[in-house]
Image (tube, rainbow, N blue to C red):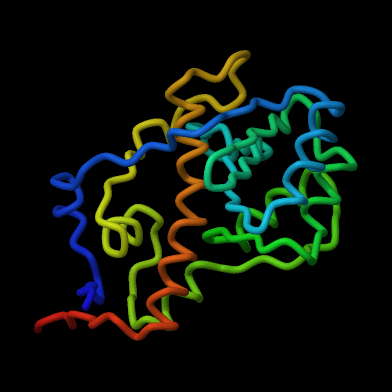
């Protein structure tokens, strides 16, 4: 039986093994590349989603979402929206109702993407709602991965420049990992819900 915590102590994350996406990464820099990527993605059984936005360090300064990352078990596409915008094929992907698409804090991501171009949101699964069915209170990707899958997702690249001319290898791996981990978390949550093979360790007062 798997033991999971109602709330995972952030201090315990540092001791866990670092997790990093090890599959193929494609950086999408043109509408033609986006068309090919979306054609591939819409033929997959499940997709993980996330976005990145250039951080703002001035009060009142806001940036549009710069990157949309979409991953399968072994392949990730990084759509550089600051270069290509929310083109027709990406809009089609976001409006799709057939492929299982999973993300975390999707309301915020979708709101930011709507600032690039209006679209009608398709079918997505929100991990924050899904994990509540297990009795887990944590909402962050890092804590959920540590709790359910026993690994540490590093956040060191989070506040880097996502509008840089070239994304570094570290940025690419970070972005791909966040999207890919959503797939793994969804599958583990579903496994536990279906088998009931888990116990939640409650907080002690």
Q: Quadrant of residue 125?
A: bottom right
Q: Position of residue 30 (x, y in %)?
A: 81, 23
Look at the image and tell me in which quarter the C terminus lies. Answer: bottom left
Spot occupied by residue 178 in the image (x, y as percentages of width and height): 47, 45
Q: Is residue 34 above or below residue 147?
A: above
Query: Residue at coordinates 52% horizontally, 60% vertically from top-left?
Result: 104
Q: Position of residue 71 (x, y in %)?
A: 59, 44
Residue situated furthest right in the rendering: 88
Q: Quadrant of the N terminus?
A: bottom left
Compare residues 1 and 110 and report the one nearer the observer. 1
Q: Residue furthest left?
A: 205
Q: Image point 27% across, 50% down: which residue?
A: 151
User: Is the residue 62 above or below the residue 169 in the image?
Assistant: below
In this orientation, which residue lies closer to the viewer: 194 or 153?
194
Total marks shown come to: 0
Observer-nearest of 176 and 160: 176
Q: Quadrant of residue 95?
A: bottom right
Return the x and y of residue 8 as percentages of the image width and height: 22, 65
Relative height, residue 31 to residue 87 (above, below): above
**On the picture, is 164 further left or further right than 142?**
right
Lateral position of residue 34 relative to residue 163, left or right: right
Q: Is residue 34 above or below residue 166?
A: below
Residue drawn 23% across the image and 82% down it: 199
Q: Residue at x 86, y 26 (%)?
A: 32
In the rendered image, which quarter is residue 145 located in?
bottom left
């Amino acid at each position: 039986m798997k033991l999971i915590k109602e709330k995972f102590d952030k201090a315990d994350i540092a001791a866990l093994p670092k997790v990093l996406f090890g599959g193929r990464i494609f950086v999408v820099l043109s509408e033609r590349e986006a068309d090919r990527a979306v054609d591939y993605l819409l033929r997959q059984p499940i997709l993980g989603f996330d976005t990145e936005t250039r951080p703002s360090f001035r009060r009142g300064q806001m940036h549009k979402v710069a990157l949309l990352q979409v991953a399968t078990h072994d392949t990730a596409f990084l759509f550089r929206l600051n270069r290509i915008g929310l083109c027709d094929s990406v809009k089609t992907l976001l409006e799709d109702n057939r492929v299982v698409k999973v993300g975390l804090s999707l309301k915020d991501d979708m709101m930011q993407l709507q600032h690039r171009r209006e679209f009608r949101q398709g079918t997505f699964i929100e991990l924050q709602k899904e994990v509540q069915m297990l009795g887990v209170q944590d909402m962050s990707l890092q804590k959920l991965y540590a709790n359910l899958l026993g690994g540490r997702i590093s956040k060191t690249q989070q506040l880097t420049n996502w509008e840089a001319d070239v994304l570094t290898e570290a940025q690419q791996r970070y972005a791909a990992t966040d999207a890919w981990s959503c797939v793994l978390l969804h599958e583990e949550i579903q496994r536990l819900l279906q088998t009931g093979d888990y116990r939640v360790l409650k907080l002690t007062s």
